[in-house]
Amino acid sequence: MKKIIYPEKKDWMEILRRPALNTDTLRNTVKEVLDKVKTEGDKAVREYEERFDKVKLDLLGPARLRANVPSCRPRSAS
């Protein structure tokens, strides 16, 4: 982090300027992700999870919950 202490007034606008985000590439990335998930399902989710979140999951969604949270497991009929 760059510390700026008592900058001159002429520098304020430059200091406060936010970086521009190229939404065209963002839109393309999101579309690619959604299209792949739509066609490949969980396989694509796992690939993107590993790529973006840097984790590799064995289970997704309800199966993951049932495996890790006892209260989410189906109850036996009594």
Image (cartoon, grey):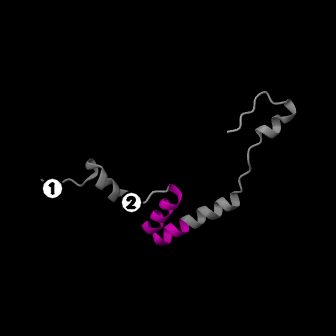
In this picture, which residue range is highlighted in magenta?
A: 34-53
Gap between marks 2 and 1 measured at Cα: 26 Å
> Does the magenta-highlighted stretch encompass residue 42?
yes
Q: Is residue 18 left or right of residue 57?
A: right
The location of residue 8, given as percent across then percent down, is 85, 30
Please tell me which residue is depicted at 26% across the width and 47% down the height of the picture: 71
Please tell me which residue is depicted at 33% across the width and 53% down the height of the picture: 65
The location of residue 14, given as percent across then percent down, is 81, 40
Residue 70 in the image: above or below residue 29: above
Instruction: Kindly identify which residue carries mark 1.
Output: 77
Where residue 77 sits, quadrant-wise, is bottom left
Instruction: Kindly identify which residue carries mark 2.
Output: 60
The location of residue 2, given as percent across then percent down, is 71, 38
- Spot the residue most to the top: 6
Q: Earlier in the sequence, mark 2 or mark 1?
A: 2
Look at label 2 and name its amino acid: Leu
The location of residue 1, given as percent across then percent down, is 67, 39
- Spot the residue most to the right: 10
Q: Is residue 4 left or right of residue 44?
A: right
Q: Main secondary structure of the magenta part?
A: helix
- Spot the residue most to the left: 78
> Does the magenta-highlighted stretch encompass residue 30?
no
